[in-house]
Image (cartoon, rainbow, N blue to C red):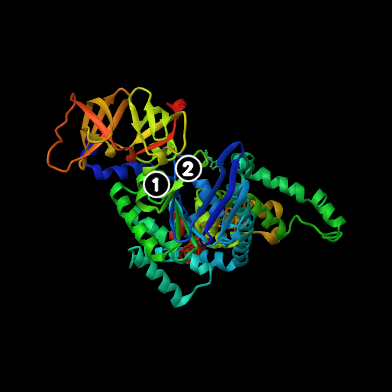
């Protein structure tokens, strides 16, 4: 007590200490380890040695450019789709939900009660060639007689969109929910039609939620491999699939580590550009 | 008389089983400063929201000028509101807040800048256009809200307790400034408040509301000097009400006291049980006036401009103010017996409200 009194300015750091310690042990140390690994050469049988093997990075970029590009493409499309679905959903719950609000929110997070893997496997069944969706689409002629959904980029993007929708919807909901409804009345009082009031007041005030939602969706989606593995074919594989197989199947640890770093670097760069474009003010409200 | 700017005809508003506004009719003259005064929950905000277009009446019509506006949405009415909570747009600068209505009406460029800056100057915020609302004090935010509404030169400006959040000193100052601004711009103001002093200071005409209805409508002087009901007498300032029975065309016999004279105009043909009202500052200590009551001073309080006495009489406790014209106290002190007297012309008569005592 008296120690804290004398060193009052230490208090914030002491409060931060557990979190910093956790981050240090479980984030920074493994990251350092990964960096070290990414510069090794050798193989599982003869062992790995640290040789400043920058070539790993070069191989990662040159050998898997297509996978990188596809990852960001899928992630971007899924993020946009999730935004288009989530915004009206969140808007409706926030402003029209009334006493059903909490129940409706529960529905949004309900998928989380089942693990990610099982949910995606369920989609595999739903979209399967013998499944009901494909049969109906074939019957009404939207799909050709041997057209399919599974193992297409459509299925992968749809899977990612579905799996990350709550991460988009919840932050948007929060930013809309905390908005003062009288501001919309004020806008209408000042000759703004319903639509103008939305564009000039509601939308700008919900931007922090939109920005948070797009980041929470795009970042994990770019590194995802489950959807491409279960719902796509090898032609739809993303960089996550490559990293996963190099780590767990081919035991090419240095190459996998180097790819992870490239992925991380590109995502960081994109987030930085995005934050600059929308203004960091939007991130903090 | 010209057509009134705002006219409510038999307007009723029900929320489920709550009757918020009950068969209310009202004319507000063009260019006047009109106050809606009443206790919390009496329906002031609801009335204002119906004029603004945020609520639709359950029954009755509302006219703005010649035009019947039922069903017309808020953004199509030539009316602006200063909200109780200000409701400034937090993401816009002060300048853009004020420019909001003009931009919706396609005012652009130099005209826009000129009008916004002139208005900021009127409300004393010149040079603060680039700030965000959260960087302003409460009083400054209040002025932005006012400027944001006034800059559109609406036919009618609605103000819902705009001074409620300010401290007493600032509130007094803003009352006078608002009045001056209204005088300068010549727009009809409808001002909602539950503060009788504020309504009296600012308004040309006041409607005293109670339970969704108008109790009395008149100038501050009329309401104060000749309140029509005991409710109005009690709501505006302090008043002494003494019960009695009418005993002639200009006299009332007090229930537990002598017969007193009142003006025939004040009695206005009433018969039976009534209450005679006298304002505390119109009662003299001493027997200089025709109507007199004996009593004993039980309390004395010095309140600056006046000394307040509470005097116990057969007709109950009466409050008396005596102006502190000369230094020190006025001589009378608790325990003294005294005579109270007043002139017939400075009393008023209202229907007795025995049941509410
Ligand atoms: N949207 C609503 N739904 C249900 N009842 C309402 C609604 N708005 C107002 N009321 C009721 O109508 C009555 C009048 O409310 P109003 O807000 O007009 O009062 P007020 O005179 O403005 O009071 P205050 O001085 O406290 O602001 C109250 O009994 C209130 O509970
Ligand atoms: Mg109110």
Q: Quadrant of the N terminus of chain A?
A: top left
Q: Nearer the viewer, residue A58 or B294?
A: B294
Q: Nearer the viewer, residue A38 or B131?
A: B131
Residue shown at the point (87%, 55%) measured from the top left: A139
Earlier sequence position, callout 1 versus callout 2: 2
Chain to which mark 1 belongs:
B
Q: Nearer the viewer, residue A78 or B73?
A: B73
- Using the rendered image of the protein, determine whether residue B136 is visible from the camera's viewpoint: no
Foreground tag (1 vs 2): 1
- Total marks shown come to 2
* In the displayed structure image, the side of residue B139 where residue A262 appears, left or right: right
| Residue B228 locus on image (x, y percent) | 44, 40
| Residue A61 locus on image (x, y percent) | 55, 66
Residue shown at the point (63%, 46%) measured from the top left: B59
Characterize the local packing of mark 2: few (<14), some (14-19) or many (20 or more) Cα atoms within 10 angstroms. Answer: many
Query: Residue under circle 1?
Result: B222
| Residue B314 locus on image (x, y percent) | 31, 22
Is the C-beta separation of discs 1 and 2 under 8 Å?
no
Characterize the local packing of mark 1: few (<14), some (14-19) or many (20 or more) Cα atoms within 10 angstroms. Answer: some
Distance from disc 1 to disc 2, alpha carbons, whole Å, reads 16 Å
Chain to which mark 2 belongs:
B
Disc 1 beta carbon < 8 A from ligand 1?
Answer: no
Query: Residue under circle 2?
Result: B209
Disc 2 beta carbon < 8 A from ligand 1?
Answer: yes
Quadrant of the rendered image containing residue A116: top right
Up-down: is B275 above or below B34? Answer: above
């Amino acid at each position: 007590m008296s120690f804290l009194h004398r060193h009052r300015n230490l208090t914030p750091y002491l409060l931060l200490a557990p979190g910093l310690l956790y981050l240090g042990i479980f984030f920074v140390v493994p990251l350092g380890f990964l960096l070290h690994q990414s510069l090794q050469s050798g193989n599982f049988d003869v062992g790995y040695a640290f040789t400043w093997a920058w070539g790993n990075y070069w191989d990662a970029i040159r050998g898997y450019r297509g996978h990188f590009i596809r990852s960001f493409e899928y992630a971007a499309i899924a993020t946009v789709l999730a935004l288009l679905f989530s915004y009206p959903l969140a808007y409706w719950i926030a402003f029209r939900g009334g006493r059903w609000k909490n129940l409706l929110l529960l529905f949004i997070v309900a998928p989380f009660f089942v693990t990610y893997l099982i949910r995606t496997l369920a989609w595999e069944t739903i979209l399967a060639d013998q499944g009901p969706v494909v049969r109906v689409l074939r019957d009404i002629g939207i799909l050709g007689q041997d057209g399919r959904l599974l193992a297409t980029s459509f299925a992968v993007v749809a899977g990612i969109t579905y799996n990350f929708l709550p991460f988009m919807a919840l932050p948007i909901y929060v930013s809309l929910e905390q908005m003062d409804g009288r501001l919309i009345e004020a806008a209408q009082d000042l000759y703004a039609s319903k639509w103008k009031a939305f564009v000039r007041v509601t939308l700008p005030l919900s931007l922090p939620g939109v920005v948070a939602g797009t980041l929470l969706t795009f970042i994990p989606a770019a590194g995802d491999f489950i959807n491409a593995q279960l719902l796509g074919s090898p032609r739809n594989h993303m960089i996550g699939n490559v990293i996963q197989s190099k780590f767990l199947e081919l035991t090419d640890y240095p190459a996998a580590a180097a790819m992870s770093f490239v992925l991380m670097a590109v995502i960081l760069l994109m987030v930085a550009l995005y934050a600059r474009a929308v203004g960091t003010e939007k991130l903090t409200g | 008389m010209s057509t009134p700017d705002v006219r409510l005809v038999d307007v009723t508003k029900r929320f489920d089983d709550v009757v918020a506004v009950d068969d209310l009719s009202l004319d507000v003259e063009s260019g006047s400063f009109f106050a809606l005064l009443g206790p919390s929950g009496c329906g002031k905000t609801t009335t204002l929201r119906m004029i603004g277009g945020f609520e639709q009446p359950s029954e009755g019509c509302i006219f703005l000028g010649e035009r019947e506006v039922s069903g017309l949405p808020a953004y199509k009415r030539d009316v602006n509101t200063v909200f109780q909570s200000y409701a400034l747009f937090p993401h816009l600068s002060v300048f853009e807040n004020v420019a909001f209505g003009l931009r919706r009406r396609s005012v652009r460029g130099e005209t826009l800048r000129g009008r916004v800056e002139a208005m900021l100057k009127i409300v004393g915020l010149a040079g603060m256009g680039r700030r965000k609302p959260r960087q302003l004090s409460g009083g400054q935010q209040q002025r932005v809200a006012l400027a944001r509404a006034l800059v559109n030169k609406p036919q009618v400006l609605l103000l819902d307790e705009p001074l409620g959040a300010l401290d007493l000193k600032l509130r007094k100052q803003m009352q006078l400034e608002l009045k001056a601004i209204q005088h300068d711009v010549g727009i009809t103001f409808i001002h909602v408040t539950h503060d009788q002093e504020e309504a009296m200071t600012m308004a040309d005409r006041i409607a005293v509301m109670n339970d969704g209805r108008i109790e009395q409508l008149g100038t501050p002087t009329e309401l104060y000097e000749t309140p029509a009901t005991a409710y109005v007498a009690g709501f505006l300032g302090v008043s002494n009400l003494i019960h009695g029975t009418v005993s002639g065309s200009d006299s009332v016999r007090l229930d537990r006291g002598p017969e007193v004279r009142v003006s025939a105009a004040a009695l206005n043909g009433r018969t039976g049980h009534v209450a005679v009202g006298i304002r505390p500052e119109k009662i003299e200590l001493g027997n200089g006036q025709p109507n007199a009551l004996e009593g004993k001073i039980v309390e004395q309080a010095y309140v600056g401009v006046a000394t307040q006495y509470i005097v116990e009489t057969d007709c109950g406790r009466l409050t008396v103010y005596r102006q502190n014209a000369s230094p020190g106290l006025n001589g009378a002190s608790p325990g003294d017996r005294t005579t109270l007297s007043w002139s017939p012309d400075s009393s008023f008569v209202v229907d007795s409200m025995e049941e509410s005592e």
